[in-house]
Image (cartoon, helix red, strand yellow):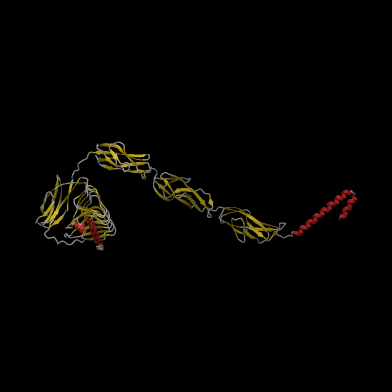
């Protein structure tokens, strides 16, 4: 055919040069055709040439799954069946042998991470892992401490189950008090102090996060000085105190500097103890307390000294039972309208029979007539008087040995292990012993009519005898029916042993009924303390000398209590202002402290 064409060209009269060119083109085309035949010889149809993974790219939330597929093709694009091996090469999750991909917990873009491999060929796909739904909310900072009125910006961070941050807009609220919070999370502390647990809350949907706030007092805003006004006699003292508060009225600790700015006396700059001067008058706003830039004032009225006015006289003991011819020493205690003890020297008399009495001494001698002589012993000072009743009895049961022997402790109205103190106006109508200590303070102005044994051998022996008596009382059996389960005030008790594993309280009047037996004994065992705000009254022959209070720690005889009986305390004993005791205050290890106008008389 080629020859035919050439002969045709020849017949058409082609030039030799044209014929050469034509021949070259024919040869070249033939070479190309042969080259094509060689390619078909290398890549036969059905041989895998490409591998494509889909979908690509693919976005998934954390934990979500996606089935990937791989398609193989030959050089012509015809499908070639394959069974690829699947793998993850750049993170983002895991893939099964069948190509099921599960997104991990880390968000981000993972290029060409899903790989399908068949022989030496492979294909890849990119995965984008997005954050999951909101799973938790954290509020910071927590805990935080703010003063009243202080502010704190709170931040809420949301995360998905994998810990990836999830953007959200929280709703802020206060759920347990402590202040207020606005829509942006700015908290303002309120005026109430305390710790407000998990009170600041950021929520979204059904999820929430919380923060705890402790609100403390704000800066000192005001100081109040008390008392204000204060009335102080010339030359006497008055203790001033302050209370500092913040702007919300919460108490703020304050240690002021004290000064006097308008006369009237002097004041200790550190303690606030004011001493009135010699000139009476009203000194307005003269006491000044200062802390930083905050100050407050109080007025002092300095008055001339006044003579106390006697308003009452109390005679003790009352009542008392005596046989004909027996004697009894009576004691008179005077007080002013405020209950303060006033020294009094009464005139004694017998106004309803029953015996005779020394007008100056108060020593009564029972007569021969049997009977009850009500209010017969009378002590008089000026227009004020007090009385006591005497029972003259024909037969008195023979003395019965006391349930406990006080030994050398008996002459003492007060015994202490360390010290005895008295503020003013106290009268101890007995001996006082201290051992192993020897500190005695406040005598005078307080008075001891007996002998003082301060750290000497007599006091040491008295402490030994006191310890024996204390242990004897503590070891007495207490019937279960006599267990003390409530305050003894307002009750009446017969002779016996009464006990409490903890403390004994007496508010009001406790009546001890001797049942006509002057040897009737009353023992009260307190495991810890004795605290009083009332009186002990003895009836039907009960005697103060036969009443014993065994106290496992300390005893406090409250303000103006009229107490009777022997107090044996392991540690200490305190008599508050105007309390009286017919008996003994015997402390083994600690101190005995008297306030103002206390009187102790042996029973």
Quarter of the N terminus within the rendering? bottom right
Residue 358 horizontal/vertical position (percent): 11, 50
Above or below 602: residue 481:
below
Residue at the farthest left position: 368
Regarding residue 156, the answer to whether it shows in the image is yes
- In the picture, residue 590 is in which quadrant? bottom left
Residue at the farthest front position: 457
Q: Which of 163 and 576 is in front in this view?
A: 576
Residue located 64% across and 57% down the image: 115
Q: Nearer the viewer, residue 63 or 117?
A: 117
Residue 84 horizontal/vertical position (percent): 65, 60
Above or below 270: residue 33:
below
Quarter of the C terminus within the rendering? bottom left
On screen, residue 40 versus residue 502, left or right, reads right
On screen, residue 449 versus residue 209, left or right, reads left
On screen, residue 407 versus residue 167, left or right, reads left
Residue 364 horizontal/vertical position (percent): 12, 53
Regarding residue 422, the answer to whether it shows in the image is no
Above or below 476: residue 531:
above
């Amino acid at each position: 055919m080629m020859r035919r064409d050439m002969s045709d060209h020849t017949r058409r009269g082609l030039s030799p040069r044209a014929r050469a060119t034509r021949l070259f083109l024919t040869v070249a085309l033939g070479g190309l055709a042969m080259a094509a035949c060689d390619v078909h010889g290398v890549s036969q149809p059905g041989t895998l040439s490409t591998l494509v993974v889909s979908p690509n790219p693919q976005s998934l939330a954390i934990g979500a799954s996606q089935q990937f597929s791989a398609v193989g093709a030959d050089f012509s694009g015809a499908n070639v069946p394959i069974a690829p091996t699947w793998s993850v090469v750049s993170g983002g999750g895991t893939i099964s042998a069948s190509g099921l991909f599960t997104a991990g917990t880390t968000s981000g873009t993972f290029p060409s991470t899903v790989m399908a491999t068949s022989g030496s060929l492979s294909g890849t796909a990119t995965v984008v892992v997005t954050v999951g739904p909101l799973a938790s909310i954290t509020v910071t900072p927590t805990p935080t401490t703010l003063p009243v009125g202080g502010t704190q910006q709170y931040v809420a961070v949301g995360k998905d189950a994998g810990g990836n941050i999830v953007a959200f807009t929280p709703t802020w609220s206060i759920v347990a008090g402590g202040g207020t919070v606005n829509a942006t999370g700015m908290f303002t502390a309120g005026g109430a102090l305390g710790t407000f647990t998990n009170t600041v809350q950021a929520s979204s949907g059904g999820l929430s996060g919380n923060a705890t706030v402790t609100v403390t007092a704000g800066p000192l805003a005001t100081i109040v000085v008390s008392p204000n006004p204060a009335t102080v006699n010339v030359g006497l003292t008055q203790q001033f105190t302050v209370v500092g508060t913040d702007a919300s009225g919460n108490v703020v600790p304050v240690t002021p500097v004290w000064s006097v700015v308008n006369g009237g006396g002097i004041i200790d700059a550190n303690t606030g103890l004011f001493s009135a001067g010699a000139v009476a008058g009203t000194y307005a706003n003269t006491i000044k307390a200062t802390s930083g830039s905050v100050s407050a004032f109080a007025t002092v009225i300095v008055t001339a000294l006044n003579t106390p006015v006697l308003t009452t006289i109390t005679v003790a003991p009352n009542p008392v039972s005596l046989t004909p011819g027996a004697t009894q020493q009576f004691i008179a205690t005077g007080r002013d309208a405020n209950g303060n003890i006033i020294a009094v020297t009464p005139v004694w008399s017998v106004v309803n029979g029953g015996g005779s009495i020394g007008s100056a001494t108060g020593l009564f001698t029972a007569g021969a007539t049997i009977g009850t002589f009500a209010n017969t012993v009378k002590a008089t000072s000026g227009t004020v008087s007090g009385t006591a009743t005497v029972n003259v009895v024909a037969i008195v049961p023979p003395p019965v040995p006391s349930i406990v022997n006080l030994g050398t402790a008996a002459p003492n109205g007060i015994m202490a292990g360390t010290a005895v103190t008295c503020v003013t106006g106290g009268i101890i109508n007995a001996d006082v012993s201290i051992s192993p200590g020897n500190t005695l303070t406040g005598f005078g102005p307080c008075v001891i009519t007996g002998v003082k044994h301060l750290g000497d051998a007599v006091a040491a022996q008295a402490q030994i005898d006191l310890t024996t008596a204390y242990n004897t009382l503590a070891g007495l059996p207490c019937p279960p029916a006599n267990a003390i389960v409530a305050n003894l005030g307002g009750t009446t008790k017969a002779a016996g042993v009464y006990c409490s594993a903890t403390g004994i309280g007496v508010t009001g009047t406790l009546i001890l009924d001797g049942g006509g037996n002057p040897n009737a004994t009353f023992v009260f065992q307190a495991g810890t303390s004795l605290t009083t705000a009332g009186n002990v009254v003895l009836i039907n022959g009960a005697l103060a000398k036969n009443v014993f209070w065994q106290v496992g720690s300390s005893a406090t005889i409250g303000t103006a209590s009229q107490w009777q009986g022997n107090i044996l305390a392991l540690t200490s004993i305190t008599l508050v202002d105007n309390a009286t005791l017919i008996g003994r205050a015997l402390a083994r290890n600690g101190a005995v402290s008297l306030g103002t106008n206390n009187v102790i008389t042996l029973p």
